[in-house]
Image: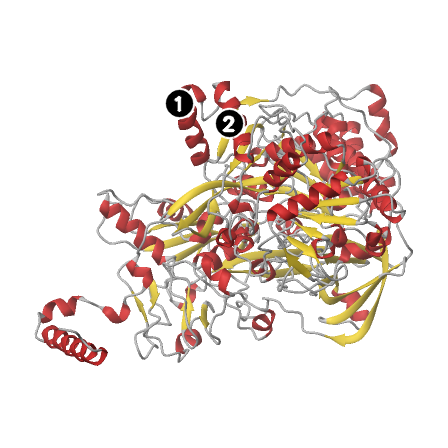
Amino acid sequence: MAQESHKWGMVIDIDRCTGCNACVIACQSENNIPINLEAHFNQRRAIQWIRIERYWEGEFPNVKARFIPIICQHCGNAPCEPVCPVYATYHNNEGLNVQVYNRCVGTRFCANGCPYHVRFFNFWEPEWPESLKNQLNPDVTVRSRGIMEKCTFCVQRIRRATRLADRDSVELEDGDRALNPACVNSCATNGLIFGDWNDPDSQINQIKNKEMQEGGRAFGLLENLGTSPNVIYLKQVDESAEGHHGH
Amino acid sequence: MPLTRRQFLTLMGGSAGAAVLFQACGIPEKELLIDSSVEMPEDLVTGLDNWYATTFQDGLSSQGIVVRIMEGRAKKVEGNTDHPLNRGAHSAQAEAMLQALYHPDRISSPLVRTGTRGSGEFREISWEDAIARLASVFDNLSDTNKAVMLTDIVNGNEKLVLDKFVSSTGIRQVTFEPVEHTNLLKAVDHVFGQKNIPDFDIDNASLILSFGCDFLDTWVSPTRYSRGYGQFRQGHHHRGKLIHIESRFSTTAANADEWVYVNPGTEGMVAMSIMHEMASHGEIDTSHFSQSDLYKFEKYTPEFVSSLSGVSVETIQHIAEEFSHSDHPLAIGGDSASAHTNGLQNLIAIYSLNLAVNNIGKSGGIIFNPEPPIAGLESNQPNSSQELMAIVDEVKSGEIELLLVKDADLYYGLPDSMGFKNNYSNVPMIVSFGNMMDDTTSIADLILPQNSLLEDWGTDVPLAGPGYQTVGFQQPVVRPYFESRGQNLGTKGFSDVLMTTAQVMNVDLELGADTYKDVLQNTARELYELNRGDINGSKYSSFQSFWNALLARGGWWDHNYKSNHSFDFGGLVDIDEPSFHGNGSFHLIPFYSSAFHDGKYAYLPWMQNLPDPLSTAVWETWVEMNYKEAESMDISEGDVIEIRSSNGLMIKALAWPNPATPPGILGVPMGQGHRDGGRYSSGRGSNVLSVLGLNFDSQTGALAWSSTKVNITASGENIRLPKLENSVPDFPRDEHNHVVEITNGKSSKGH
């Protein structure tokens, strides 16, 4: 990683994803996401920066369930950014789609604009019992009522790892667990891989180069919308399927 | 000059004003550098953190974890990359150990009951008083045999201390798991002659045939198996194939290339039939089979088995062909396949498939686990439900004078028809070591709360190891949370409490140690003197430096010390037809909840808000049923369904009709329906274990928990099923570009 600026990105291999949800809780723990109560789910206001969606295909006995993890795609051409009247969401010079909490006034235009539905509005002041607050990550803001929040690729980890690398005069290492977002480190099947698109040797670039070729499995989620996501998905393989699948 | 308060404030105000003035006249370009309105803690990064290694024991297996500590508080759990079992990954449950530590309803001191049993009225007492009370109960026993210690499956030094305590005091010890693994362990012993569960080399397998076990989500060691699964799918040139045979559509079924529905309890016959087919084509390895074994599967022709199992002749034939021709075939089974009256027979047949392709000790096959490096650390074996029922019978007849309960919530986990709930008052004294008010702790007379996982010492020699000698070390990564309450209140380690109690009773446990940490250090000293392993004692100048390295690494393991793989096969057995409890029209298949497992994690709010992979439901108990069947019964999602077993017991669950559940099957997750357990689980949902009929495996006495037949009625009420699905709109489906690759690696371009 010798280059000056970074462009952080991720590869999500759906063929490895088992839908186990370990990433969801790892994210909740790392990023001070409030406990989603029953009422939050019923009002469709649960906050999950990463979620596993399940899609059905067919019916018994020829039935399949497909899992796909959905996070903020950190789009190069993000529909959420130009609509913000107060510049609370912007693209930083490392390819991250960043949300500035103390600028946000809660118009929710960004959530309307996002085709991936990965932006969440705080309809309530987040609450934890006093003792559970001991677990909260001091590196991450607790978002108050009335503002938007979303996946940051665990920017606090990127900052910390960068600062420590600077201090020790070493370069950031591709795949360093101190740099990886929490979801990536938790994934047992290595279905999530994080790295720098500007580093030609990074693992994500190696995968991209291989899977973008004819016969490869790479695709961008809703890429036909022109959002140029920073996340690449790899298709699931199903040798036994017949007919058309997918979404 | 003496200052009045008013003068002081005036002066302070003036100097503050001056400071502002000076600032305003200061250097403007510096101000511009400070982008204060967008500075967030994410950018600031203050404070130093430390990551400490410890071990998370979870039933039959475990995970090495590292915990992030800042200013004495635990902030984050991640997998320990060095630990051989999980190699850096970790489960949602491991993460939630943070909430177990900081749970708002944790018990913060020893308690003695003041109100009637179950009233929840307790009074705090000191540890000294509590241990004196416990010791006096022992002294007043009419017969030490009338005291029973009920625990979860324990191993390592905790088991060592427990064994010594039990043998020195003459009490009995019984292991309790709500969903027992008796049949699995007996089958492994029968087929492979092993006391431990072997490792399954999923990484290198080319074809996995799994029967009933949801190994990607809940079965035995899901994090380890998922580690292998990632490699199995995309780590090699040839993508592995997973064929899953189960009566219910589980998470593993969802991930399988081929899910085959099988009638409940006939899994073993299908396995026999596969061997029959392999033999009839001369494609069976007979090196482990005797002549009589070869006769055993003769009657299980695909035609015969098909009529009983519902699996078509063609399916059996093609599985047999693929299994015998695969380079690295592997067969595993458990859970619902083992939870029948013929459960042991089922598993013997299933695991014998591995002998039929002779994959023992081979890449992609069955890898035996060697004995632990130090005798006595091996895990204890689970007791069967029939053995537990014998204890409950003694409870009923008033023969038990003292019940000691450690991580064994039998009030919750035993089926109601066993009669514990109605008869526990016959036990004069119930002592719990729980640190949460679980259902059994809430009926206890004396509570000696143990430390939480992150506050305690321990070692871990899992029943399902990585295929070589492993001793995980658990250390306190934070000081006990209730330490501020003083020496006489707060929580203490379970083993330490046993050792102190023995001291008070003047019983010598012959451990050669005063504290549990000393016991651990004695074990570490033995490991040090072995002079082998990945943390090799010979490379350290002193024991202290070895000990430090051991704790920093999270344990000791020797990847060169493996099993020699010699064994005697116990022989194939005939498979009886399964018998069911009750005559209802639906098969009730309880399943391990992805979040709560058998119920022990229901008190954790992160687990309550964790969506089930398939239903995406949270915070509730639902019942999976086939959507066409539901439609014909005029049942829709959220309808409150009353599920009745023939013993007159009933639970309620919210209907979740879906396209995957087979007709005639009802799947209900375990884990909810706690009477107590803190604010997050108390009175929430239903406990499916409570309605199960008392139907046992004919040979092992294991509860056939998947063999209850029930009837259902809609109560007429409808409650919205809380779930993640539909929180956001589905992504549009694109008929021309496919997310799922259909062809055999020769895909077309597009997405």
Q: Residues within 10 Å of mark 1 (few under 14, many from 20)?
A: some
Residue with the mark numbered 2: B524
Q: Of residues B455 and B246, which is closer to you in this image?
A: B455
- Mark 2 Cα within 10 Å, few/some/many (few <14, many 20+)? many
Direction from residue B733 to residue A94 in the image, left or right: left
Front residue of B336 and A69? B336
What is the chain identity of the residue bearing mark 2?
B
Relative depth, front residue between A240 and B383: B383
Residue at 68%, 25% in the rendered image = B358
Q: Residue B655's spot in the image, x, y percent?
A: 74, 67
Image quadrant holding the N terminus of chain B, namely bottom left
**Going 57% across and 55% down the picture, which residue do you hit?**
B108
Q: CA distance from mark 2 to mark 1?
A: 13 Å
Residue receiving disc 1: B540
Q: Is residue B191 left or right of residue B677?
A: right
Q: Amino acid at mark 2?
A: Ala
Type of residue at label 1? Answer: Tyr
Q: Chain of mark 1?
A: B
Q: Is residue B430 above or below residue B294?
A: below
Residue B267: x and y in percent read 79, 42
